[in-house]
Image (cartoon, rainbow, N blue to C red):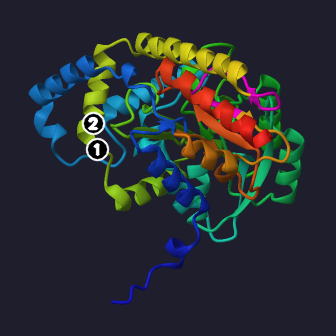
Amino acid sequence: MQLRLSQAILKPDFQGEFTASILAAAASPDIISFAGGLPNPVSFPIPEMEAATKKVLEQNGVTALQYSSTAGWPALRRWIAKRYETMGVYGVEADDIIVTNGSQQALAMFGMAMIDPGDPVLVEDPTYLVALQSFHMFNPNVIPVTMNADGIDCEKLAAAVKAHPDAKFIYVIPNFQNPTGLSYSQQVHDKVVEILKGTDILLLEDNPYRELRFAGTATDSFGADLGEQCCMLGTFSKIVTPGMRIGWICVRNQELRAKLMSYKATADLHTNIFSQMVLAQYLEDNDVDAHIEKTRQLYKQKAEWMMDCMRRYLPAGVSFTPTEGGMFLWATLPEGLTAVDLYRRGLERGVAICPGDPFYETERNVRTFRINYSNSSDEIIEKGIRILGEVCADMIK
């Protein structure tokens, strides 16, 4: 049989192929993997989830095991809507929330609802590789805008908006940006609002790491200043459990919300209702802020230990950006070296990192790479960084 596949699925997928190779390599029990972005299982509230599951089945088992509505479980949507007050956004209603299969599904939903072939979309440079992968399926004209130490480069953003006033949206990760770990300063936040206000460019704010800040102060959500011009993406994967695959979109424009819901209904009908109900019960019965604080303290210790190991074991010329939260560190090799070469040599020594290349729309053979500190023991962190230091030293020689 001769398959006749779509042009969209046949397009080269640099990000997808790179991710698959990294995950395949890191799946080996013999590999120390700093390549992924896994939460630490120590943070999973297993006894509390067991109690919530038992209660849901005893009190509402038929509903939990039946088909449900596309928008999601009302109690969970109400909790999410209320949570936005902690980000400076008031007046969010449960009806503004669509529960998704992880926040990752939201990227495909926006791609389908908003992108026609050739449409300009703005992204940070670098940015989350799966966002690029998702948007590429719809064949947009991706316009990368450089990241600075305090957030997106506002001069270049203003120029990009002026050159592409028809851009459909800009995708940003304002807190502990993936991959760089950078956060937007208040000054940059305010300037972005100034640049976008009065345009028809939607801002997609992805905020999976905001709750994981263990130092410094976070800015409020862009939704506080931009209203319905800002759609806010969130997830429970980093603060409760990733295995349930529960994220959400907050979209306050009724027309856009209806279109997103229409696409989601055709894609999966609804997100796993059983998991939604168990999660909602867990949130009702437990102090999630206390749980998040324990996770913050765990990650603070992990981050400080990995940064200490990097200072001790990485040779001169290899630098990294200190972090105040999130799950990643962003490092840079000296001129003349590439992170892809480090990735390959590291694998030969039993350590996996994530080269920076798939996070960029156009740049290749870059010197930057991302490493994850959240999911390894202290002993593994020290061993892995020591080996990376030896590999870097050999490359420099």
Give the residue pinned by disc 2: 275
Please determine whether, in this image, residue 275 is positioned above or below residue 156: above
Residue found at x 45% / y 25%: 239
Residue found at x 20% / y 23%: 50
Image quadrant in which you'd find residue 198: top right
On screen, residue 382 versus residue 393, left or right, reads left
Placement of the N terminus among the 4 image quadrants: bottom left
On screen, residue 300 versus residue 201, left or right, reads left
On screen, residue 270 versus residue 22, left or right, reads left
Coordinates of residue 320 in the picture (x, y in percent): 74, 29
Q: Residues within 10 Å of mark 1 (few under 14, many from 20)?
A: many
**Would you say the residues marked 2 and 1 are in contact, meaning their CB atoms lie under 8 Å apart?**
yes
Give the residue pinned by disc 1: 272
Residue sitting nearer the eye, 231 or 14: 14
Residue found at x 52% / y 49%: 22
Q: Residue type at mark 2?
A: Ser
On whether residue 175 falls in the magenta region, the answer is no
Q: CA distance from mark 2 to mark 1?
A: 6 Å
Q: Which residues are magenta?
A: 315-330
Q: Residue type at mark 1?
A: Asn
Q: How many marks?
A: 2
Query: Taken as a whole, is the magenta stretch helix, strand or loop?
Result: loop
Name the outermost residue toward the bottom: 1
Residue found at x 25% / y 23%: 49
Please determine whether, in this image, residue 2 is positioned above or below residue 32: below
Coordinates of residue 397 in the picture (x, y in percent): 80, 40
